[in-house]
Amino acid sequence: MKSNYKILIIDDNIIDQIITKQLLKKTLGISEICTVNNGKQGIEWLNNYKRNPEESLIILLDIKMPEMDGFEFLSEYEILPEELKKEIQIFMLSSTLDPNDITRAKSNKYVKHLLSKPLPVKEFSEMIYPDSSSKTA
């Protein structure tokens, strides 16, 4: 099945970016994956994003990052035009154990789900492809 998703990974850890990209490519067949290193770059990327009506954008957002963290990104995201936010799903992908971070992520209206690093591919696949059998090997 051809993926109709484009992925934006917002994470300052290059190793985590590489691991997440490989998991998405090898197990879910998602090939359109962009990465940025912090929330500020993520907002800039979104402001330049030209949406293809055939695809949806999924953002995998880390919490702890320099310059603009995940929650600061969400505050900036909230004021973006509604037209831009159409067909975008945000998943926080973090290794945080901080109960405050977990509560904030789960209560944010833009965050679909908080996932723990490394990306739990089977769980993620079931969330983004709910009507099909798991694509994982």
Image (cartoon, grey):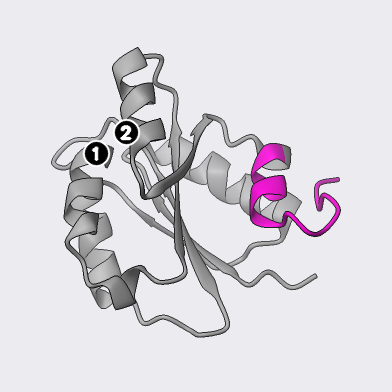
Residue 98 lies in the magenta stretch: no
Toward the viewer: 132 or 26?
A: 132
Element at label 1: helix
Element at label 2: loop
Q: Residue at the location (31% across, 39% down)?
A: 12
Labelled pair 2, 1 in contact (Cβ < 8 Å):
yes
Q: Residue at the location (69% across, 38% down)?
A: 123
Q: Quadrant location of residue 69?
A: top left
Q: Residue at the location (32% across, 23% down)?
A: 101
Q: Which of marks 2 and 1 is nearer the N terminus?
A: 2
The span shown in magenta is 123-137
**Does 18 appear above or below 32?**
above
Toward the viewer: 7 or 112?
A: 112
**Does 49 appear above or below 96?**
below
Residue 131 lies in the magenta stretch: yes
Which mark is on residue 103? Answer: none
Q: On the rendered image, what quadrant is the N terminus found in?
A: bottom right
Tell me the residue that label 1 is attached to.
71
Q: Report the predominant secondary structure element of the magenta stretch.
A: loop
Residue 104, horizontal then vertical, whole percent: 31, 29
Instruction: Identify which amino acid the numbered label 1 is placed on.
Output: Phe
